[in-house]
């Protein structure tokens, strides 16, 4: 009897566990575009289009290679619009009772498959450097789970940029070289763009019809949608942008959306690129003398360090992790996250590019939209839903630890040893947003004061009990305590007034 081999929209790799386990001569691959996945949060239309187009391409390739594929398009009249219901329908059609699946990257879907009345075998998703067991072993007995130590183990395990058992250049981490402010000129034209072919155009029409009301611009659509294109996009990055990736990794420019970033996370996360192949390409460029060590190490750390680490945290901490709210922040997400007007130029520019591209780079996510959400005390569940919806690379296993943990400190400090908060000064140093902003970054209180300046102290003050003893935050509290009392009162009053106006929907 044939078995059903489930391949989800973020499992589009030849080497995915369920396909490796399958027998091409008798098993049936099941792939389904279902409304449930497209709308449980209002995903950006570009993200939905990426996944559907890449699924269709992948299914076509599997068929060319001799697989039998039962593929449900979103508009098929028979489509029951949920993964489990589609499995049941295909099982009945094929007389199958057994399903082989690769474990999804989200507890919601894992639970749905575990509850499915068919016999479902979930195989570990081994398209990662570390297995769940390895991460658990590493975490066992440690008081603090700091990424840096985990990363060193991953360097040793992969041998990437290693000389024997020592790191290349005798240093594990070149981060201090990677904090240059925004350059005046960026000599990289951005990620490689692809013209939609017939398959992609059909998907774009479908997404426009079905999800056109979601936040985000669908066209122009330029993402890679198969492995071959994604590899070309990677080579383009390695050749033209990697050499300066490290230097300007943290910089932000209002009119340049990508700087020297790779824009490959979206391809890795759905399986079009393998994380190790990406790192090996970068390592090779360094070995060939085409990229400096700070760029190559910095990039590889993002993938075998951060990416693996956040996945480990998500699965170690269980299904409740994404809903944590350690700081008890309850304020509603303001409309300007969904494109409403704001006078804060940094936020308005970060949201504008998110709406256009389903993309913002790490520092825009962390130090602009994330920083503001934390300072203003926005509800982490709403913030997390926003991040999950708006970025093309957002899947819960990677989004939740980055948002709930790294950015909002809502996990109580599992990931970050202190909250990533800053006043306007950081944004001003690393970007050109403040030039031309309605607010003045140098103004601390009164007319035109930058809201980040006010909210920064408001945050520290309202969470004094929790953070004043944190060794890494002592200086911040000492500076606050040294201000005279009238000044402190003014700051807090103005911050409160700002938050009230924001929550009342006034233009801020
Ligand atoms: C609040 C917040 C939310 C985020 N949400 C997501 C998300 O939903 N999905 C996602 O893949 N990344 C997320 N990140 C991490 C990071 O911002 C993106 O991976 C990166 O911006 C993707 O763009 P890029 O491919 O140009 O990456 P580059 O800046 O060129 O970095 C290279 C690669 O490193 C990996 N990487 C870098 N940082 C991280 C990280 N912190 N966690 C995991 N992988 C990382 C990605 O695979 C990325 O493609 C988030 C970060 C923050 C602060
Ligand atoms: S002045 Fe403040 S609000 Fe305006 S761009 Fe700078 S940091 Fe953002």
Image (cartoon, rainbow, N blue to C red):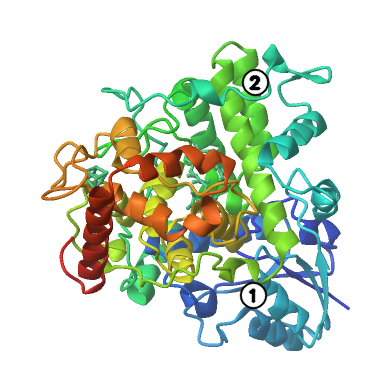
- Outermost residue toward the top in this view: 289
Residue 348 visible, this angle: no
Tell me the quarter of the image containing the C terminus. Answer: bottom left
Q: Residues within 10 Å of mark 2 (few under 14, many from 20)?
A: some
Q: Position of residue 464 (x, y in %)?
A: 47, 56
Q: Position of residue 443 (x, y in %)?
A: 18, 41
Label 1: element kind: helix
Q: Residue at x 59, y 19 (%)?
A: 285
Residue 37 visible, this angle: yes
- Image-based side of 440 in relation to 458, left or right: left
- Image-based side of 198 in relation to 323, left or right: left
Q: Nearer the viewer, residue 198 or 372?
A: 372
Q: Is mark 2 within 8 Å of ligand 1?
A: no
The image's mark for residue 473 is none
Could you tell which of marks 2 and 1 lies nearer the N-terminus?
Answer: 1
Q: Is residue 43 above or below residue 192?
A: below
Q: Residue at x 78, y 59 (%)?
A: 19
Q: Is mark 1 within 8 Å of ligand 1?
A: no
Question: For mark 2, what is the residue?
Answer: 284
Q: CA distance from mark 2 to mark 1?
A: 39 Å
Q: Is residue 179 above or below residue 473?
A: above
Question: For mark 1, what is the residue?
Answer: 108
Q: Nearer the viewer, residue 341 or 497?
A: 497
Q: Residue at x 32, y 39 (%)?
A: 427
Q: Nearer the viewer, residue 383 or 223?
A: 383
Instruction: Indicate which label's residue lies in the foreground, 2 or 1.
Output: 1
Q: Position of residue 273 (x, y in %)?
A: 62, 43
């Amino acid at each position: 009897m044939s078995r059903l081999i489930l391949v989800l929209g973020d499992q589009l790799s030849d080497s995915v566990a369920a396909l490796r386990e399958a027998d091409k001569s008798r098993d049936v691959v099941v792939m389904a575009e279902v409304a449930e996945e497209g709308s449980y949060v209002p995903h950006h239309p570009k993200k939905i289009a990426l996944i559907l187009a890449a699924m269709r391409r992948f299914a076509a390739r599997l068929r060319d290679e001799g697989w039998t594929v039962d593929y449900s398009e979103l508009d098929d009249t028979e489509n029951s619009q949920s993964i489990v219901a589609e499995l049941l329908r295909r099982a009945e059609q094929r007389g199958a009772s057994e399903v082989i699946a690769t474990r999804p990257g989200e507890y919601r879907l894992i639970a749905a498959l575990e509850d499915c009345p068919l016999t479902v075998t979930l195989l570990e998703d081994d398209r990662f450097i570390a297995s769940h067991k390895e991460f658990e072993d590493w975490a066992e007995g440690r008081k603090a789970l700091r990424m840096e130590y985990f990363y060193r183990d991953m360097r040793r395990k992969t041998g990437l940029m290693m000389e024997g058992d020592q790191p290349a250049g005798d240093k594990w981490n070149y981060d201090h070289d990677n904090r240059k402010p925004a350059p005046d000129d960026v000599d990289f034209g951005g990620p490689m763009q692809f013209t939609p072919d017939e398959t992609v155009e059909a998907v774009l029409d479908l997404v426009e019809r079905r999800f056109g009301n979601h936040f985000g611009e669908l066209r122009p659509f330029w993402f890679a949608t198969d492995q071959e294109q994604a590899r070309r996009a990677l080579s383009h990055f390695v050749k033209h942008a990697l050499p300066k990736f490290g230097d300007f990794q943290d910089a932000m420019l209002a009119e340049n959306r990508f700087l020297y970033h790779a824009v490959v996370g979206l391809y890795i996360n759905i399986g079009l690129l393998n994380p190790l192949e990406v790192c090996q390409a970068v390592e090779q460029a360094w070995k060939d003398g085409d990229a400096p060590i700070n760029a190559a190490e910095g990039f590889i750390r993002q993938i075998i360090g951060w990416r693996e680490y956040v996945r480990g945290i998500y699965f170690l901490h269980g299904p409740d992790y994404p809903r944590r709210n350690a700081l008890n922040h309850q304020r509603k997400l303001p409309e300007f996250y969904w494109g409403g007007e704001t006078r804060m130029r940094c936020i308005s520019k970060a949201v504008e590019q998110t709406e256009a591209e389903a993309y913002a780079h790490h520092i825009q996510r962390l130090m602009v939209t994330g920083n503001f959400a934390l300072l203003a005390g926005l509800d982490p569940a709403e913030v997390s839903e926003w991040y999950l919806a708006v970025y093309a690379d957002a899947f819960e296993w990677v989004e939740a630890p980055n948002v709930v943990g790294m950015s909002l400190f809502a996990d109580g400090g599992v990931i970050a040893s202190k909250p990533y908060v800053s006043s306007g000064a950081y944004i001003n140093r690393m970007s050109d947003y403040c030039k031309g902003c309605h607010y003045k970054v140098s103004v601390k209180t009164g007319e035109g004061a930058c809201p980040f300046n006010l909210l920064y102290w408001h945050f520290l003050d309202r969470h004094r009990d929790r953070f004043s003893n944190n060794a890494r935050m002592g200086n911040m509290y000492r500076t606050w305590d040294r201000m005279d009392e009238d000044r402190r009162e003014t700051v807090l009053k103005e911050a409160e007034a700002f938050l009230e106006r924001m929550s009342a929907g006034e233009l801020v």
